[in-house]
Image (cartoon, coloured by chain):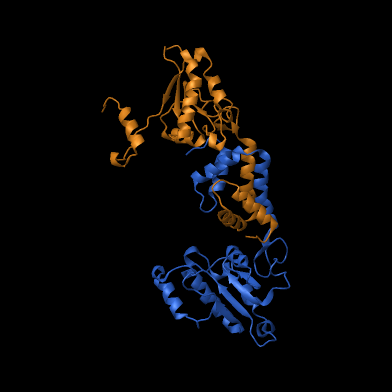
Chain colours: A blue, B orange
Amino acid sequence: MELPSRLMEVAVDQMASLPGIGRKTALRLVLHLLKRDEERVDAFARAFTDLRAGVRPCTTCSNLTESEQCSVCADPVRDERTICVVEDLRDLLAIEQLGLYKGRYHVLGGVISPMDGVGPSDLTVEALVARCGNPEWVQGTDGLPAEVIFALPTTMEGETTAFYLYKKLEPTGVRVTAIARGIAVGDDLQHADEATLAQSLNQRLPYST
Amino acid sequence: MELPSRLMEVAVDQMASLPGIGRKTALRLVLHLLKRDEERVDAFARAFTDLRAGVRPCTTCSNLTESEQCSVCADPVRDERTICVVEDLRDLLAIEQLGLYKGRYHVLGGVISPMDGVGPSDLTVEALVARCGNPEWVQGTDGLPAEVIFALPTTMEGETTAFYLYKKLEPTGVRVTAIARGIAVGDDLQHADEATLAQSLNQRLPYST
């Protein structure tokens, strides 16, 4: 489809470079932008240059921030001795939205996926191991070791990543846990897949009210 | 969902201001942009400011162009005495892609839709009537009046617009036609809707091979 102007070609190409946006959708969005006045289009464009220039990963946990440290790491009230490992910012936001987790985070920036060319060196694995490399932090003063919680996807890639991280973290003496898998709240058993049903049976807990 | 930075809020808001892009998708796209290097994000943003500053409607037909006149209007080979009326650029592109239409266009910029607050004055109706207001152009030298082809959507809004335009163009003496509706090529009759089947029966043509 030949567009009537080179500038439109460029704009449609750029829009279509976003994941999940095809050329037809890109054209629709570009035509929408052309209906806006110039000021609004400038504000649209500036939002992304400002974002890229102003937002960086937290030096501790790789959550995103405009400062050195993210708001979670800079919060003195949050439990320093619990680290929740997530794939990306969206998973962190999903947990934060619950409002019940009071520890810190570690954002991996992906999961190990040889098919997509993502190896451990593409993720913030070394930084996580370094965070757990302080024996005083691991042992603590209350006799309980520090805890690393895996909150990773329940996919093959997520499982592989969890196993890799576990092997890396084991020597540090940190207590490694993983969020529970089982029947989702509100679901019935007959519609659950076999793997989920089997895990929820194997990982049964004492009944409590 | 509270984002970890104000710049991210702004960027997600801007992305979500595009039609069909919800906040979850917007966040996914913004996180994708953050993974790119600064130069590529600047090029992304610049594409839209350049587009808005450089592209304007053709002064004759409202097709988009970087000059005064669009490439179709500026092409001396295209038949000046046939104007195809389309809702927007995407419909123009669909017809151009066929490579068989050799006339000019008129881009309305929408269809009349009282529900969406779009009236005739929001469209390029007056410009179309003005184009047909030259009696010499309408009569021509070969005895055949100039032709305006309606290639409008087959929706209620499209039909309303066509009727409105017809009433406006009737006094000019121009020959008004509309693209055929009927069973799509490759479809079978039993799955066609009643309105389409009725139209295709009413508008039957002499059989030709």
Left or right of B80, for residue A42: right
Q: Position of residue A32 (x, y in %)?
A: 57, 41
Instruction: Name the foreground residue: A73 vs A111.
Output: A73
Q: Where does the C terminus of chain B fall, quadrant-wise?
A: top left
Left or right of B191, for residue B106: right
Residue A52 in sight from this viewpoint: no
Q: Where does the N terminus of chain B fall, quadrant-wise?
A: bottom right
Left or right of A3, for residue A192: left
B100 vs A148: above or below: above
Q: Position of residue B74 (x, y in %)?
A: 54, 25
Residue at horizontal 64 percent and vertical 45 percent from the top: B46
A55 vs A11: above or below: below
Q: Position of residue A58 (x, y in %)?
A: 68, 66
A177 vs A152: above or below: below
Instruction: Name the foreground residue: B25 vs B202.
Output: B202
Residue A194 in sight from this viewpoint: yes
Res. A93 image quadrant:
bottom right
Residue at horizontal 51 percent and vertical 35 percent from the top: B89
Residue at the outermost bottom position: A143
Residue at the outermost front position: A209
Residue at horizontal 55 percent and vertical 50 percent from the top: B21
Q: Position of residue B162 (x, y in %)?
A: 47, 27
Res. A96 image quadrant:
bottom right
Label tally: 0
